[in-house]
Image (cartoon, rainbow, N blue to C red):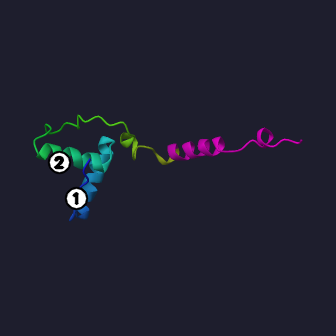
Amino acid sequence: MTQLTVRGVDAKLHNALKETAQQKGVSVNRVVLDALRQAAGLEPAGGQSQQRHHDLDYLAGTWTAAEYDEFMAALTEERSIDDELWHTNA
């Protein structure tokens, strides 16, 4: 897969891309790729990409602060070590 760097993105365009991504619940990268595909005539306007991915991009930026805190608390609990299971008194 080829990477492309886009220069000259001003703050107004960047903010619009971020807002669109947030509204659609996708990454900014996905918004840009969809726009490029539509501009190149590879995809109908208004539709999301038909390309299937097996990653978690669709989750990026979708958690609230409370959901993040809840997840981190659960993760911290899961990472704790039960000393009785790991240390023996032989």
Q: Which residues are magenta?
A: 67-90
Q: Secondary structure at mark 2?
A: helix
Position of residue 62 measured from the top left corner of the image (x, y, whole percent): 40, 43
Identify which amino acid the numbered label 1 is placed on.
Answer: Leu
Q: Secondary structure of the magenta portion, mostly?
A: helix
| Residue 75: quarter of image | top right
Q: Residue at the location (23% across, 56% down)?
A: 4
Quarter of the rendering occupied by the C terminus: top right
Residue pictured at 57% horizontal, 46% vertical: 72
Label 2 is placed on what type of residue? Leu
Residue 22, percent from left and from top: 33, 46
Give the residue at mark 1: 13
Taking the spot 56% from the left edge, 43% from the top edge, the residue there is 70
Outermost residue to the right: 90
Q: Is residue 71 magenta?
A: yes
Residue sitting farthest toward the front: 90
For this orientation, the residue located farthest to the left is: 41
